[in-house]
Image (cartoon, rainbow, N blue to C red):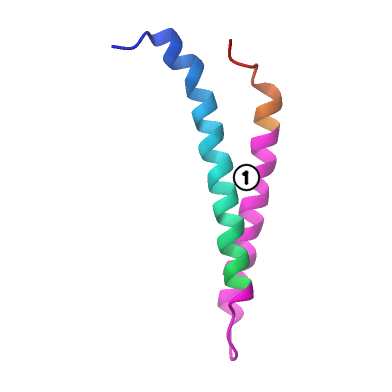
């Protein structure tokens, strides 16, 4: 069994990596949805694409703010 102290030290770093990966994924999928819009009535798809991009950017902001506050692991 792992030492609880080492698990606690590594956990914030894993959470930040997951937050960064999900932000990039959201931005990429949002851009793909925006670029891949077909002809016709696509207002719903365009709105969904913009929502994904905005959520990704907000997640990146949270990532950088949390990264500043998290002390480096020793």
Residue 23 versus residue 10 in the image, above or below: below
Residue 70 versus residue 63 in the image, above or below: above
Q: Position of residue 53 (x, y in %)?
A: 64, 59
Residue 50 on the magenta span: yes
**What residue lies at 57% left-to-right and 71% top-to-bottom?**
33
**Magenta part of the protein: which range?**
35-64
Q: Secondary structure at mark 1?
A: helix
**What residue lies at 56% left-to-right and 33% top-to-bottom?**
16
Res 38 → quadrant: bottom right
**What residue lies at 64% left-to-right and 36% top-to-bottom?**
63
Disc 1: which residue: 59
Q: Position of residue 46 (x, y in %)?
A: 62, 74
**What residue lies at 39% left-to-right and 10% top-to-bottom?**
4
Q: Quadrant of the N terminus?
A: top left
Q: Position of residue 59 (x, y in %)?
A: 62, 45
SS majority, magenta: helix
Q: How many marks?
A: 1
Q: Position of residue 3 (x, y in %)?
A: 37, 8
For this view, does 34 lie left or right of residue 14?
A: right
Residue 55 on the magenta span: yes
For this view, does 3 lie left or right of residue 31?
A: left
Label 1 environment density (alpha carbons within 10 Å; few <14, some 14–19, many ≥20) = many
């Amino acid at each position: 069994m792992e030492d609880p102290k080492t698990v606690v030290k590594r956990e914030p770093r894993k959470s930040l990596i997951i937050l960064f990966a999900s932000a990039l994924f959201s931005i990429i999928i949002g851009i793909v949805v925006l670029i891949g819009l077909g002809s016709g009535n696509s207002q719903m798809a365009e709105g969904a694409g913009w929502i994904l991009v905005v959520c990704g950017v907000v997640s990146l902001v949270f990532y950088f703010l949390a990264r500043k506050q998290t002390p480096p692991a020793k």
